Image (cartoon, coloured by chain):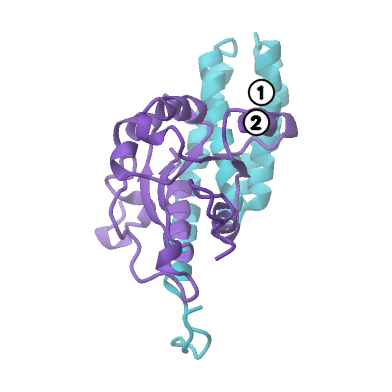
Amino acid sequence: MAGRDNIGLLDRPDADSTHDRPQPFPGPPLPGVSAMSGRRIVLVEDDDSIRLIAQLSLETLGGHQVLALASGEEAVARAAGFRPDLLVLDVSMPGMDGPETLAALRGQASLAQVPAVFLTAHTQPGKVAEIRALGAVDVIAKPFDPQALVDRVARVPRPGGSDPEAS
Amino acid sequence: MNGGAGPDGGPEESTFQKVLRQLTADYARLLPQRLAELEDKLRQCEDMPASDERLLALQRALHTMAGSAGTFGLGALGEQARAVELLLVDLRQRGAGSAADLAPVAAPLRLLLRDARAP
């Protein structure tokens, strides 16, 4: 049995539940990351390791605020309260999967126009096209490089049309 | 990078790099548990090959590994998991009824387990 000091980030007692701390990873964004560029992102991913690394990347490298949730059901209950301007959803999750979650979120008035990006380990072109057709502005393949995730998110147009890459 | 020098005189490790290193170490430390779970799910399928519920549970575990291992520096493992996952998807579409049906999935999965556990 590992001692308490040996407990890692993936062993946290709440590893299967919601992670919505405002600043889970210590320290400011890296130099060159403007706080003004930060988005409010709801991230839904059931795999603890991927959820944590995606959250870390988006917060620390991207300067975004992230509400990280472990299930579609949690997202439906909590996303609107966070007032996100971007949704990042895993496709394959137990319970409500990513497409079902997006459909439910789209049914909430305040989230109806929020752009969505899917994360998926399905990389077959036909499957990716199918996923994109569900209304996602991008489909990011897993496994991903942390910086590549941040770069892809930066290319997603903001609601209202301003281009984050142009500023 | 944040600039400055680290304890060994090299570039100072950023907060991101520190946490990424810890997550990668955590993933490696928990890998034996994930592999044991995969093996257990495989055995459950072999006990009842016609159970699509069991096949789906195995497929989900493989899918998770395929989508995560590469991010933590275990790209070959992730690719193996993806290859076995696709075999299993195909098997589920055709419908498994016996242990013999499952063999084309079980063999490469056992190879994956052996490779991942190799020192």
Location of residue B112 with respect to B8 vertically, above or below = above
- Residue occupied by mark 1: B89
Label 2 neighbourhood size at 10 Å, few (<14), some (14-19), many (20+)? Answer: many
Label 1 neighbourhood size at 10 Å, few (<14), some (14-19), many (20+)? Answer: some
Which residue does the image show at 47% across and 76% down from the upper left? A31
Which residue does the image show at 64% across and 38% down from the upper left? B81
Q: Report the disc number at residue B85.
A: 2
Q: Position of residue A61 (x, y in %)?
A: 48, 65
Q: Report the disc number at residue B36.
A: none
Chain under numbered label 1: B
Q: Position of residue B23 (x, y in %)?
A: 45, 58
Q: Position of residue B89 (x, y in %)?
A: 66, 23
Q: Which of A163 and A124 is in front in this view?
A: A163
Q: Position of residue B102 (x, y in %)?
A: 67, 19
Specify the amino acid type for callout 1: Val
In which quadrant of the rendered view does residue A82 lie? top left
Q: Is mark 2 on a helix, strand or loop?
A: helix
Q: Colour of chain B?
A: cyan
Q: What element carries label 1?
A: helix
Specify the amino acid type for callout 2: Glu
Q: Which of B56 and B13 is in front in this view?
A: B13
Q: Position of B16 compared to A22: left or right?
A: right
Callout 1–callout 2 Cβ contact below 8 Å: yes
Q: Which of A96 and A41 is in front in this view?
A: A41
Q: Which chain wears purple?
A: A
In which quadrant of the rendered view does residue B84 lie? top right
